[in-house]
Image (cartoon, grey):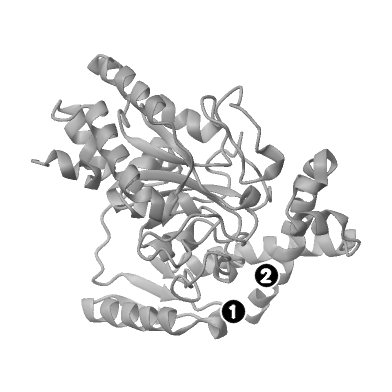
Amino acid sequence: MAVSQHELYKLSATQAAGLIRTNQLSAQDYAKALLDRVRERDPQVRAWAYLDENAILRQARKLDALPPEKRGPLHGIAVGIKDIFLTRDMPTKYYSRLHAQDGNAAADSACVSVLRAAGAIIFGKTATTEFASMTEGSPCANPHNSRHTPGGSSSGSAAAVADFQVPLSIGTQTGGSVVRPASFNGVYGFKPTWGTVSTEGTSIVSVSADTPGFYARSVDDLEFLAHLFRLDSLLTEPLHPLSIIGARIAFVKTHIWPEAQSGTRAAWNLAHRLLAETGAKVEHVELPERFGNCPEWREIVIAEEARAAYLPKYLQDRTKLHADIVALVESTNVPSRKKLLEAHDGIARLRREWDLIASQYDIIITPSAIDEAPEGLESTGTAACFLPAALL
């Protein structure tokens, strides 16, 4: 495919990898095109917490010097890394004053190790909220309208991909921190099943919910990453293209539907109509009333796990932590052991029930956000849509 030098930044990861593999594009030229895009757009989007142009070009030169037989599947492809993943050649600061002076880590996090081993250019660290747990926004803005939030906490990861600054990025999700920014920025977001991607070397809020996830501008690119992280090894049978005609599709509003605003309701109705007109077997599914307990159970479980995660940071220097983190650690309103066990057991029962419901359909559609990206950078929006799904 013929692509002008000025439009290299528009390539998907799959397209760029193909050109590099066939010697039609060098890693250095590709990196330079992306850096030109960053320089042009960074004043408006501010997607990067850390970016070193010279380090990027050094990586690209080193990759170009490799013989073909030593090149990995992501050879020369730039990937943005949420600034809560440890990196051996970049500082990790978690958007927290507590870590403002931190240097490089001794080793890469597991996700970064996988990407680096595959030949990716670790392009930089993307903006996040404090420890990926606050809804108070970072300086990052929505690339489609800089007066609006990009969502969070994986703010910069989604914004950088949406703005063609990198083709791929990684983020994390506790409640809705992968899927909501994907919705707000208009890119593909993929949160794999909990436990299938290692969280080693990543800041953890909840051991029961936190999951690394991926951003891309095409489904092919997400499939590329899924294969790289061996997610297809979990399949019991080969994947085949799914025809929409005759596909069983469930629309599940969940308990948050009363909060849904005009943008979400309009998109919901349009999707339902288009899929039905295309020949899909569309069905509205009402979850049993007991699923309404999920938000309360989720709050109990994740709050207790977050309290444990934040305690060492609190003891290190509470004056450098967000007030909400301090309040959580200091709170005396702690659920009893009985309440905590009831929450864990209740969630476990719902998981089994949810699996039975889901097994009846090819696709399940739920809201990704209660509306379009709200105006203002003070808040990244509500994660209400994905609080139950984070534990199911």
Q: Quadrant of the N terminus?
A: top left
Residue 260 locus on image (x, y percent):
51, 81
Height in image: 87 above or below 254?
Answer: above
Height in image: 196 above or below 18?
Answer: below
Height in image: 144 above or below 261?
Answer: above
What amino acid is at disc 1?
Answer: His
Height in image: 35 above or below 355?
Answer: above
Q: Which mark is residue 371?
A: none
Name the residue at 54% across, 25% down. 88
Name the residue at 27% across, 72% down. 246
Find the distance from the CA under tag 2 to the CA under tag 1.
9 Å
Q: What crowding class fits label 1: few (fewer than 14 Cα within 10 Å), some (14-19), or many (20 or more)?
A: some
Rendered image quadrant of residue 364: bottom left
Q: Which mark is residue 255?
A: 1
**In this orientation, does residue 171 appear?**
yes
Residue 96 locus on image (x, y percent):
66, 45
**In this orientation, does residue 346 appear?**
no
Name the residue at 26% across, 28% down. 27
Q: What crowding class fits label 2: few (fewer than 14 Cα within 10 Å), some (14-19), or many (20 or more)?
A: many
Nearest the viewer among 26 and 120 is 26
Q: Which residue is mark 2?
A: 294
What amino acid is at disc 2?
Answer: Cys
Q: Quadrant of the C terminus?
A: bottom right
Name the residue at 75% across, 49% down. 321
Residue 35 locus on image (x, y percent):
32, 38
